[in-house]
Image: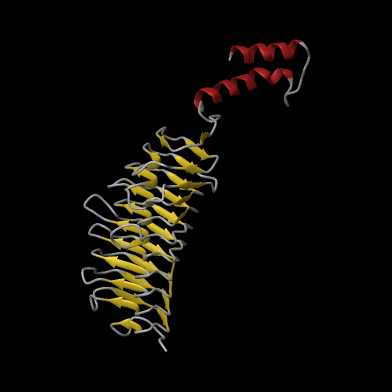
Amino acid sequence: MANFFKMVQSCTRKGITRVGVSSALLPAVVSIVIVSVLIFPNKARALTPVMNCSVLNTAGETYNVINNISSPGVGATCLNISADNITLDCQNFTIVGNGLLNDGSAGIRLNQVSGVTVKNCIVQKFQTGIHDVADGDGNNRFEQNTANNNGDVGIVLGASIGDIAISNTANGNGGGFAVSGAGIVITGNIAGGTDNILRGNAANGNNGTGIVIAFPGAENNLVIDNTAVKNTEEGILVNQCSDNELVGNRLIGNRNNGILLLANTSNNSLEENTAIRNGQFGFNDFTMGLNNFVDNKCIANVLGGSNPTGLCAPQP
């Protein structure tokens, strides 16, 4: 600050007027600068570059990946986010695992944090691509990420509250673990799994199900305008949970059902979804009436439009 005063005094003595105010206003300008520095000390903070697998633990920081990253460790997490309000921007660089696919590894893991944004990341060849281990925390945002070819799941929102996943791609996951995989999963437990939003995501070609909402506590989630195409099991699976909304999703060419609701679900609302050419039914509701269906469309599904009938129209 002392150097700033010397600079101003020197410029005034030399008659230099390169600021856009007269010399008479310089004291006021100096005062404004001093107040700005005192009140907003972090505004000029540089972005933190990320070049290797790291722990990201400075709250409120923005981290930018600046090159492709390989993670050779077995069972390791490459980018481990452990503080609130962090922004991670991978700038479309790729984070690649060791390819073992069933070693407990994750490309990006959030550890009970909130207010975090993860965007523009390409994550592949881990057991899990992106994993929000929330257990009751949340309000995190996942946007325009690609989590493909991971051994278990592309993106997991684990008992999160208020997460938003928008315009992500989770294709070709599964096949590396003992059970089938999935593109995107919301799980519930006693701590959370509520009020999350999946919007405009693609979950295609997974060795398992495209999108899964599962277990008690996974409630009041909105799954809207997503696509689930050519998965080896269901397009969307709803299991052991209630009060979720599935709206405007497109389910095409999945091996089993477009949407499957198992017998232990209730009061889920399905509206304006479209199921085309799935290998079993477009809509299969094992509860036989405990969920709500409005204006769903079904076309050319192998075993019929829906089970029970009447959940969608028209089915040629």
What sort of colour scheme is used for the picture?
A: secondary structure
- Considering every residue shown, the one lying at the far right of the view is 15
Q: Residue at x 21, y 68 (%)?
A: 264
Task: Tell me how many marks there are.
Answer: 0
Query: Image quadrant of residue 224?
Result: bottom left
Q: Residue at x 33, y 42 (%)?
A: 111
Query: Image quadrant of residue 311?
Result: bottom left
Closer to us: 34 or 77? 77
Q: Quarter of the image containing the N terminus?
A: top right
157 with respect to 169 (left or right): left
Residue 51, image x, y percentages: 51, 36
Residue 175, image x, y percentages: 36, 61
Residue 310, image x, y percentages: 33, 84
Q: Is residue 98 above or below residue 24?
A: below
Q: Is residue 266 above or below residue 102?
A: below
Query: Image quadrant of residue 78?
Result: top left
Q: Is residue 233 above or below residue 215?
A: below
Q: Quarter of the image containing the C terminus?
A: bottom left
Q: Residue at x 66, y 11 (%)?
A: 6
Q: Is residue 276 above or below residue 37?
A: below
Closer to us: 306 or 91? 91
Residue 266, image x, y percentages: 24, 69
Closer to us: 258 or 100? 100
